[in-house]
Amino acid sequence: MTKDLSSPSADRKRIVIVGGGIAGLAAAMALTASERRTSQSTEFDVTVLESRKTAGGRAGSFVDPSSGATADYCQHVAMGCCTNFIDLIDDAGLADQFSRDEELQFYHPSTGLSSFRAHSTLPPPLHLNSALSGLAYLSSTQKLRIRTGLWSLMRTRTAKLANTTAAQWLAAHHQDDVVRSRFWDPILVSALGDLPERVSMASARKVIIDGFAGARTASNVLVPRSSLSTIFGQQMISVLKQRGVTFRFSTSVRSIQPLSTERTSLSPSPRHRDLRRSTTIETSHDETIDADQVILATSWRSASRLIRSLEVEEEITKAWQTRTVDALDSISPSPITGLHLWLDRNLTRHPHIVMVGTTAHWLFQHGVDHQNASAGYYHQVVISGRHEWSDASKEQLIERVMDELRIAFPESQAAQLMHWRVVTDPAAVFSVSPEFEAQRPTTQTPIDWLHLAGDYVQTGWPATMEGAVISGRMAADRVRQTYHSKNTTPVPPSVLPGLPRGMLARWCIRD
Ligand SMILES: Cc1cc2nc3c(=O)[nH]c(=O)nc-3n(C[C@H](O)[C@H](O)[C@H](O)COP(=O)(O)OP(=O)(O)OC[C@H]3O[C@@H](n4cnc5c(N)ncnc54)[C@H](O)[C@@H]3O)c2cc1C
């Protein structure tokens, strides 16, 4: 059975987005943004095909069966430097669903809590000086070493770091084991999801420079106030439905094929061809759906399967297919564990704390859910990447982390753990190794109706919501450009640049 999704009028193009994660949602938002934002001349009928029951992908939630509480699989945070993610939630009218904190709390067993707050008047990157001074568990010699390392990093262009791991670069710049374990590793492992031995220094630089040194508000932390399933799985879907986007849930795409003859970017310009009905999509419901353009916005594993099954003829397309599948199959996945803890009281007055020198990496405190008060006070501990407790049982991990929390918050030593759950996603993020960075796929493919989106796409970002949003916007821009007539005003890009840098930051930081 072949389905005509929406019976579009002749000038409306049928765009199918495969995958309703953050990348797919961002693509749908960009394609349906108002004329004011896009100067768009072509109208699109946008359909999202999503294999799960709801949207959001890895940024999702579950209902804990025993307490009835809704919890995110894993706490997600964004930073002030995530300009595209912030713009996306703003565009959807969901900015109030995130709290924004300028100050970070760092805990270390030797000194307890230290505040990390950017200086309010010193120009970036000098604003970091006072923030670094606030970390009580670092000696003056260690702080000096870190400042020297930060300076070297600012003076080194990203391109020069492509073939180096973060561990190699840190060792070459005299960042010893203690400085690494107290400063660099906690930041890099949390942001990149893997050990400095495995990640590229170019990605590490992105985190440190864009996330801290480049602008005063870059290191602000944005934390969702509602569950991710409420924000992305309900509220953003509702905005998109109002904009005319159709969602088909529980619909898994099995294959995507050219409808008739293969059309590649080497073929004549789209304006001279009939681009309608370029492709046909086979779903798990044994139906086929015709479309003019497809944005493939799945995880890297699903993308690899679907790209492998494409029936292509031209040599250039076959070479791209092999190269892309090889790159995606070479990805080394990295785990993230969330420990969901319901206690009989709050552990601390702080909403979140970076934990240094402990098995726990971050502690988030959400308090009591008034809809479900009997469940207790909800806390989540996040542990990124492989660690020495990776092979321990869930019970051992809980015991270890609870011991750490009781030491960290002695005033809450009597706190009782009412209920817990440990959720590990073994392929939470991809490891941004120098090898993968060198072959990371781009949005553009040699097939003019197919565009790639997803956090794995080449955006300069590690596996983050910001990377996913940028990839979705880049794919939407390619779709819009396909139908752009030279007689109208140019299509403005929907991808926003990073935070603007002041004069001193521009002078200090080489890009
Ligand atoms: C535990 C954990 C913690 C994280 N913490 C953070 C954080 O704090 N901050 C941050 O910025 N990022 C974080 N991330 C990363 C972030 O979640 C991802 O980078 C982002 O959500 C990826 O979005 P995506 O759309 O590219 O991919 P996905 O979220 O993987 O979305 C792909 C979608 O495609 C669907 N799909 C797959 N195959 C098919 C098919 N054949 N047909 C139809 N649909 C299909 C999937 O069901 C899914 O909904 C975390 C990730 C995890 C797992």
Image (tube, grey):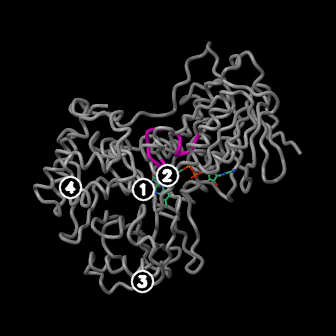
Across and down, in percent, residue 157 comes to 30, 33
Q: Which residue is mark 4?
A: 176
> Residue 415: x percent and y percent?
35, 84
C-alpha span from label 3 to label 4: 38 Å
Tell whether circle 1 marks a residue whose Cβ is less than 8 angstroms from ligand 1: yes
The answer to which of marks 1 and 4 sits earlier in the sequence is 4
Instruction: Give the residue number, with chain letter if any, for mark 1.
Output: 193
Q: Earlier in the sequence, mark 3 or mark 4?
A: 4
Q: Position of residue 140 (x, y in %)?
A: 10, 56
The kind of residue on which mark 3 rests is: Leu
Extent of the magenta region: 453-465
Compare marks 2 and 3 and give the one earlier in the sequence. Answer: 3
CB of mark 2 within 8 Å of CB of mark 4? no
Tell me which numbered mark, 3 or 1, is placed earlier along the sequence.
Answer: 1
Cβ atoms at labels 1 and 2 below 8 Å apart: yes
Using the numbered discs, state the Cα–Cα distance from disc 2 to disc 4 in whole angstroms: 26 Å
Q: Secondary structure at mark 2?
A: strand
Please tell me in which quadrant of the rendered image residue 442 appears: top right
Between label 1 and label 4, give the one nearer the viewer. 4
Q: Quadrant of the N terminus?
A: top right
Q: Residues within 10 Å of mark 4 (few under 14, many from 20)?
A: some
Dot in front, 2 or 3? 2
